[in-house]
Structures are given as structure tokens and as C-alpha cells.
Image (tube, rainbow, N blue to C red):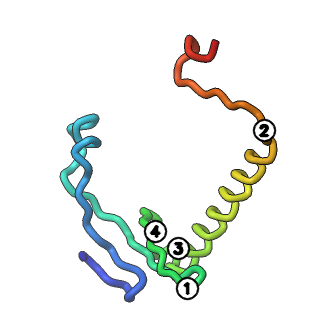
């Protein structure tokens, strides 16, 4: 841990994955990230962010991630209901779509 604003808001150092460094050798071996921990439904959740502490409090970040989670769940529900009983085919290449 590099810095602790409070027990729920810390600046930590993490290793950059070997896969990422292989794709981009200019990446450093380690990078700094802010770890914000909050409670949701009685469970601790930790999110990692690059948002600066002087502009976004830990509470702001917790609220933003909670809203984002709710939005993603809503999109999932919409997509599921739209695809009810439909066959869904996916491919990364045009050739495999036909």
C-alpha cells in the first residue's frame, strides 16, 4: 500500500499482467491504482479506479459503481426479454455468420 486516505480509500501498487506487457512492452511492471471499498447488501465490494481523490470521494465512487451495476443489470434484463426463445448466433468473423 502506498497511501491510505482512510480504511476504505487506499492507493495501492499492482503488477501489470504479463499478457498486457507482451502486447505493449512499453508498459511498466507495476502501476498505481486507487482501491475503494464499500458495502452493498452487507457485503464488502472493492473497486479499482484512476479517478482522483481530490475530485471524487470514496462515497462518490461507490455511488457511481452502484449506479453502473444497476444499469448493466437493466440492460441484461432488456436483452434477455427481447431474445426470449430466439436463437442467438455470434461470431467474430463475417464468414462464420453465414
Which of the marked residues, 1 or 4, is nearer the chain's N terminus?
Answer: 1
Residue corresponding to mark 1: 42
Q: CA distance from mark 3 to mark 1?
A: 23 Å
Query: Between disc 3 and disc 1, whose residue precedes?
Result: 1
Nearer-the-camera pick, 66 or 49: 66
Q: Is residue 1 above or below residue 28?
A: below
Of tags 2 and 4, which is closer to the observer?
2
Task: Tell me if residue 27 comes above or below residue 71 in the rendering.
Answer: above
The N terminus lies in quadrant: bottom left
When asked about the image quadrant of residue 23, the answer is: top left
**Considering only order in the chain, which callout, 2 or 3, is on the residue closer to the N terminus?**
3
Select label 1 or label 2 by which is in front.
2
Cβ–Cβ under 8 Å for marks 4 and 3 = no
Identify residue for label 4.
Answer: 47
Q: Residues within 10 Å of mark 3 (few under 14, many from 20)?
A: few
> Mark 2 = which residue?
85
Give the distance between the C-alpha atoms of the residues marked 2 and 4, in whole angstroms.
35 Å
Q: Is residue 66 left or right of residue 43?
A: right
Residue 29 in percent (x, y) is at: 18, 52
Kindly identify which residue carries mark 3. Answer: 56
Dots 2, 4 in contact, CB < 8 A: no
Question: Viewer-nearest of labels 3 and 2?
Answer: 2
Q: Residue 38's spot in the image, x, y percent? A: 50, 81
Which secondary structure, mark 1? Answer: loop
Q: Residues within 10 Å of mark 2 (few under 14, many from 20)?
A: few
Establish if 78 lies above or below 1. Answer: above
CB contact under 8 Å: marks 3 and 1: no
**Residue under the image location 35 percent in, 78 percent down:** 10
View extreme (front): residue: 85
In terms of sequence position, does the residue under pointer 4 or pointer 3 come before the other? 4
Residue 65: where, in percent of width, then height? Answer: 58, 67
Residue 62 occupies quadrant: bottom right
Amino acid at each position: 500500500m502506498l497511501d491510505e486516505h482512510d480504511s476504505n480509500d487506499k492507493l495501492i501498487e499492482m503488477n501489470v499482467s504479463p499478457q498486457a506487457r507482451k502486447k505493449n512492452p512499453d508498459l511498466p511492471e507495476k502501476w498505481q491504482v486507487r482501491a475503494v471499498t464499500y458495502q452493498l447488501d452487507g457485503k464488502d465490494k472493492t473497486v479499482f479506479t484512476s479517478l482522483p481523490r481530490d475530485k471524487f470521494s470514496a462515497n462518490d465512487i461507490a455511488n457511481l459503481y452502484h449506479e453502473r451495476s444497476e444499469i448493466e443489470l437493466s440492460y441484461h434484463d432488456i436483452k434477455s426479454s427481447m431474445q426470449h426463445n430466439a436463437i442467438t448466433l455470434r461470431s467474430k468473423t463475417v464468414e462464420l455468420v453465414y
